Amino acid sequence: MQNSDSRTNGDAPPASLTTARHRPTQDASTAPRDPAPCEDECCDLVTVPARQGLEAVDILRRGAGDTIGPVLHDGSCDTLGFLVPPGTADGWDLPGSACTQTYGRGLRVSAQEPDPGPAVPEPPVAGTGWLLPPGSETDPVTDPAVLRAALGQAARTIE
């Protein structure tokens, strides 16, 4: 079967109809870009079962000098998510929990004081709500070492 595309050159093999009609572009041929590098305001997310997470929140709020960042809960209240500094996921290995790298996709919390006002920012993940919203009563993120200790203590308390 002969290709009826008139754009072929004399000795070159005829182009397929698909190639002839939809020429590849330079943009479509490049590899996907790496995520934008995180600045100080993006974070990772440590998720734990709700019971252990609630116990850890209580431990952190009662602790001497321990601070806690914003905490999310999922719509079904099965898990809690603690916002932690970017890069935490690289070394997170606590059984019973997971730490997700976000590369700044949707999880950004400013280290600056929020503007005063009654508005609470929307949760960064669909289907979630704030247990502890970002604001003046929370740090921008939870310290991973402090969180690890609190989660360990919470697991022992539950047992």
Image (cartoon, rainbow, N blue to C red):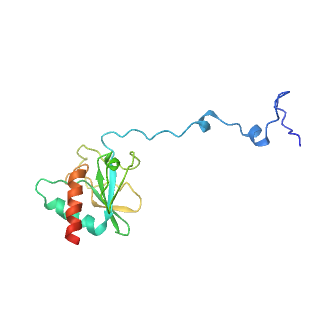
Q: The C terminus lies in which quarter of the figure? A: bottom left
- For the residue pair 53 and 76, the one nearer the viewer reads as 53
Counting from the top left corner in percent of width and height, residue 80 is at 31, 63
- How many labels were placed on the picture? 0
Write down the quadrant of residue 147 in the picture.
Answer: bottom left
Counting from the top left corner in percent of width and height, residue 82 is at 29, 56
- For the residue pair 88 and 84, the one nearer the viewer reads as 88
Q: Residue furthest top?
A: 10
Q: Residue furthest left?
A: 64
Q: Does residue 154 appear in this view?
A: yes
User: As drawn, is 15 to the left or to the right of 34?
Assistant: right
Q: Residue furthest right?
A: 1
Counting from the top left corner in percent of width and height, residue 86 is at 32, 45
Q: Does residue 135 appear in this view?
A: no
Write down the quadrant of residue 25 in the picture.
Answer: top right
User: As drawn, is 131 to the left or to the right of 15?
Assistant: left
Q: The N terminus lies in which quarter of the figure? A: top right
User: As drawn, is 20 to the left or to the right of 73?
Assistant: right
Counting from the top left corner in percent of width and height, residue 98 is at 35, 58
Q: Is residue 140 above or below residue 58?
A: above
Residue at 31% across, 43% down: 41
User: As drawn, is 18 to the left or to the right of 70?
Assistant: right
Residue at 36% across, 40% down: 38
- For the residue pair 122 and 55, the one nearer the viewer reads as 55
Residue at 87% across, 38% down: 4
Residue at 23% across, 71% down: 158
